[in-house]
Amino acid sequence: MRTSSRVESLRESPTRKIDGLRERLVREGRDVILLSTGQPSIPPPREFREYLASVLGEESMGLYGYTPSMGIARLREAISKDLYELGGITVGPDSIVVTAGGQEAMFSVLATILEEGDEVVLMDPTYFGYKPLIEYFGGKPIFVETEFEEEYNPDIDRLLEAINSRTRAIVIVTPDNPTGRLIRPEIGKALSDVARDKGLWLIIDEAYKTLIYEGEHYWFWRDAPDNVIGIDTFSKDPGIPGWRLGYVYAPRDIAPKIKLVSEEVVYCPPSFAQYAVLHYLESGMRAKHMPRVIEEYRKRRDVLVDAIRRELPWARLHVPRGSMFVFVDFGVDGEKLSEELLDKAGVATVPGSYFSNGKYNTFLRLSFVTEPPERLVEAVDRIARVLG
Amino acid sequence: MRTSSRVESLRESPTRKIDGLRERLVREGRDVILLSTGQPSIPPPREFREYLASVLGEESMGLYGYTPSMGIARLREAISKDLYELGGITVGPDSIVVTAGGQEAMFSVLATILEEGDEVVLMDPTYFGYKPLIEYFGGKPIFVETEFEEEYNPDIDRLLEAINSRTRAIVIVTPDNPTGRLIRPEIGKALSDVARDKGLWLIIDEAYKTLIYEGEHYWFWRDAPDNVIGIDTFSKDPGIPGWRLGYVYAPRDIAPKIKLVSEEVVYCPPSFAQYAVLHYLESGMRAKHMPRVIEEYRKRRDVLVDAIRRELPWARLHVPRGSMFVFVDFGVDGEKLSEELLDKAGVATVPGSYFSNGKYNTFLRLSFVTEPPERLVEAVDRIARVLG
């Protein structure tokens, strides 16, 4: 019996494919160094877990029941306050839709705004999750190449050339996955102007907004509060990717529509994760937790970057200012190299081609957060051996 | 800026609307008796919660990390075993896709099978969640009226008249929401024959399959394993609706496609809920927990039904054999009655029209699981007063 033609175009997520290969190698007893996932390696703080253990003792249905589809009101208030404290932006609770993770946030937002034939402008390189979703909703991804020399900040003239009457939205990931770049303030300002002038949605994926090592997050909402749709997640901070909790913030007229889609998709976001994050935000736990996390990840980033510069001094890279990844040009076919690294050297990586429309085929994305420092050095040794 | 035309047709879920009104009354200090939700009132067993509290003490990322999109392999094995123990059906782990609740199961299944213009046959009455989803995917819901006198078991000739070359699937909810009826074996057999003969999907929503007071669940997979797509949830058993965990089981060629959609929708089901349910199934906790739950709910069902028969002997109802609801014909406009009951008497109910294409407009759906017995009697007193 046949299935929907839209589904026929879906493919397994690239990192899922790599996960599968890696798991097979591990089952075969191979030692695999994991540079392929964007998963934190530091669990949420002890107080966070102790709090949850204590509420599990209560004999009420409160913790287990459905919540409003937009999320618990008090959580939306806490997120509103958090956005003000982090970015100085005023986003009311009615503009916030809590979702079952960042993926569902992306899904429900694109479902809400896209019509068959709409075009969405993506940076090249960018996170690989957007292209298949845009295509699933009948839209067309339009890539705007960014330059290594510009530290992947887009050129505004080139961006303007990609915009026409079918353009519906521009997607910006900042801090970026895979490159770790931050949008520079003058570029952020110019992007906001373009979105306002052309009447476009500015979808800002801020999954890593509190994982910054140097520099500051650019808050587009300050410039273009009528155009910005923020895609946010609690996967990286406080570090509960599997629990599936994220949120969208958007102008007040569109937020209720995103909520209607989200209600059809998952009915409500997971209640347990909502109560956990509510406590995390209200107790001010982040102030103690995230500096520790950032210090550890920065150390690992520096270890990885230093090892590459020492052993492979010709490899091109920018030291990532945020996120969990360093994007490295090894000057050879990235897909082949990635395959060889996994097969011959037991190092899992993600080829740059997965994030790019062709320009970054000689790059690999390396995560520096999952493995401890000595394993990162060992990974670079292995890469150097394979590259000869 | 405009939104997708598909989204423009979405409306807030009917029970969400009632929830909103109810919450307003409660804020105003009114005492509202809750007969409107399908939410369990008995939390998961103490051992279940103690187990989770203990694993929260561990310092690893295991509990927090992403899981495979189809769900943890061991959980899919436990579900496979569970289906064999409950129904004697053989469903391999590769046929099982764990989802973020029953709603996401419905969403991902319909996204997988429906093409613009496809028709889906629904019973009248049936759970109101299917119609908007079918329409969202460009399909057309076709209602087949069932009769009170037949205890809502469908007439096969009438069903056949509703099927044509555009028909893609038949949806059966059993035990039923809103009526509590079970599909009778001879009807189940005939439905399976139709699905096989006509090459149709048989979508079997079994949310209440272990909440049966009298009679037995009909397992369609035994008759038509190539046609059945099971929609299942852990919301009712063990009773964690807010945690969003469910699953789909389907033939092995379609299950991977449903997984691809689910991966785009939520990336993976919530890990915490997966570990919780894995322990629930593997420890055999259900054998102690559910008989207690069923005993309590049966008692409440009988209290509610007895009170209606005593105070409103002319009201028509069948004693529900399963689920959480009794579907009652009060002989007057159900939407008006439901509104009046909430406004004047503080009793929250759901009008029959929400489940029907017109035939059951004089019915109300009353949940008997949320309120304690004395409040159920009080609710019937209030209903009798409003009806005069």
Image: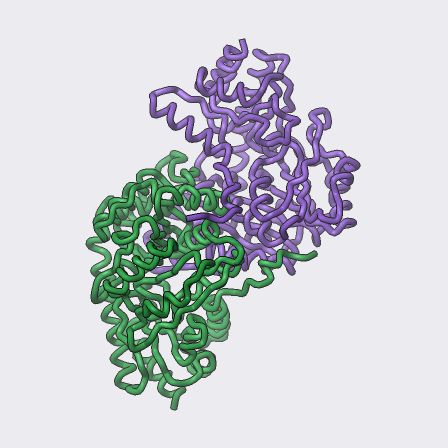
Chain colours: A purple, B green
Q: In this rendering, is residue B30 above or below B113?
A: below
Percent across and percent down for residue B160 are: 37, 65
Q: Is residue B314 left or right of residue A156?
A: left
Q: Is residue A68 left or right of residue B156?
A: right
A41, above or below B337, in the image: above
Residue located at (23% from left, 63% from top): B185
Q: Nearer the viewer, residue A296 or B314?
A: B314
The residue positioned farthest toward the bottom in the image shown = B388
Location of the C terminus of chain B (image quadrant):
bottom left
* Quarter of the image where one finds residue B353: bottom left
Please give the name of the residue rendered at 45% of the width and 46% of the height, measured from the top-left corner.
Answer: B262
Between A1 and A25, the residue placed more toward the observer is A1
Q: Is residue B239 above or below residue B282?
A: below
Q: Nearer the viewer, residue A95 or B66?
A: B66
| Residue B71 in sight in this render | yes
Measured as percent of width and height from the top left, residue A163 is found at 75, 43
> Which residue shows up at 58% across the image and 59% down it?
B7
Image coordinates for residue B163, horizontal then vertical, percent: 41, 63
**Residue with the most extreme top position:** A388
